[in-house]
Amino acid sequence: GKAQLVEDIAEKNKALEAFTEHVVPGRWADVRWPTELELKATSVLKLPIEDASAKIRTGDPKDDEEDYAMDIWAGVVPISLAAGIPINDSRLEQGIAAPEYITAYSRNSNE
């Protein structure tokens, strides 16, 4: 599809809320919502997804048979993105604890 700039403030605000809630469920209700000036300074694009594909593979690499006769390591290095321990803003007032949705945050949909 072709991307379009979202210019309507209400639509832009709704998109930012949906994005925020997708990344950190529960966050939108806790934060100060963007001002009209901030919304005007922020670009939001909408893009209809007409087709999608993904390359997903598990198991061993698919090497050529003659490669297995070589004395060279072959394998897979797993890479993952994981949420770490929350770090308070240096200007956060003492005594304000991170909410449960932050301390329990994980992008792993299996947890």
Image (cartoon, rainbow, N blue to C red):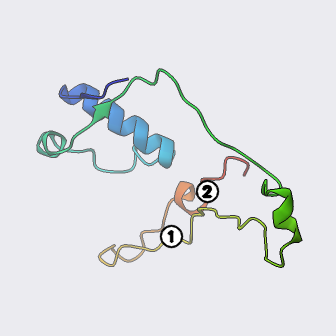
* Mark identifier at residue 86: 1
Question: Quick one: which residue is furthest to the front in this view?
Answer: 66
> Where does the image place residue 79, in percent across and percent down from the top left?
65, 64
> Where does the image place residue 13, in percent across and percent down from the top left?
28, 34
Look at the picture and state if 22 lies above or below 69.
Answer: above
> Where does the image place residue 8, in percent across and percent down from the top left?
19, 25
Residue at 72% across, 52% down: 111
Residue at 60% across, 63% down: 82
Quadrant in which the N terminus is drawn:
top left
Secondary structure under badge 2?
Answer: loop
* Mark identifier at residue 74: none
Q: Is residue 66 left or right of residue 9?
A: right
Give the residue type that dot 2 points to: Ser
Q: Few, some or many C-alpha atoms within 10 Å of disc 2 (few <14, some 14-19, many ≥20)?
A: some
For this rendering, which residue is in front, 69 or 78?
A: 69
Give the residue type that dot 1 points to: Pro
* Mark identifier at residue 106: 2
Task: Check contact, mark 1 vs mark 2: CB within 8 A.
Answer: no
Look at the picture and state if 51 lies above or below 93.
Answer: above
Quarter residue 60 falls in = bottom right
Residue at 36% across, 27% down: 47
Residue at 30% across, 28% down: 3
Quarter residue 100 falls in = bottom right
For this rendering, which residue is in front, 71 or 54?
A: 71
